[in-house]
Amino acid sequence: MAHVVALVHEEDGVFGISFPDFPGCVSTADSLDDVIARGSMALTFHVEGMVEDGEALPVLRSADGIRRMEDVEGAIIVAVPVDLPGRSVRVQITMDEHLLAALDRSARTSGATRSGKIAEAVRASLRV
C-alpha cells in the first residue's frame, strides 16, 4: 500500500482535500477525519479511472517534495493510503475444470482475460 501526499484546507468549517500528484482529484467534508476518508475514496476511484483509461500513474512525491514545489500555505499535509496497481506476477493455481471452463467463457464474453477476471473477483471479495 502506498501513501499519497494530500493537502487539506479549511474554510468556514468546510474541509477540502486535494492531491498535487493527481490533479483534479478533490473532495470535501465537514470534519478533518471525514475529508481524509472521503479523499481516500476519491483517490481510489481516480486511480481506478486512470488505470481503466490506460493513463500512466504519476511518480509520487514525498511531503518534502510537495512542500518545495507547491503552495502549501495554510494547508495541513496528510498522507492518504491507497492501493496502487503493481506489476503483474505469474502464479500457478489449481481450479475445478468446470469452474475454469465457466471462467474462460465469461472472459471471452466480456472481452477480458482469464487473469483479468480472476483479479476482478479477488478485488470484489476484498472490498469491505
Image: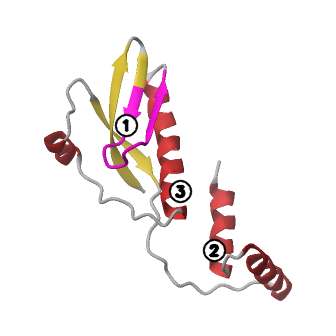
Mark on residue 29? Answer: none
**Magenta stretch in the rendered image:** 16-29
User: Helix, strand, or loop for circle 3?
Assistant: helix
User: Helix, strand, or loop for circle 2?
Assistant: helix
The mark nearer the N terminus, 3 or 2, is 3
Amino acid type at circle 3 is: Glu
Above or below for 126 versus 7:
below
Q: How many marks?
A: 3
Image position, residue 125 (x, y; %) = 69, 59
Residue designated by label 3: 48
Amino acid type at circle 1 is: Ser
Residue designated by label 2: 116
Q: Tell me the quarter of the image containing the N terminus.
A: bottom left
Q: In this orientation, which residue lies closer to the viewer: 58 or 35? A: 58
Q: Does the magenta stretch include residue 22?
A: yes
Image position, residue 52 (x, y; %) = 55, 63
Is 80 on the left-hand or right-hand side of 50?
left
Image position, residue 70 (x, y; %) = 20, 39
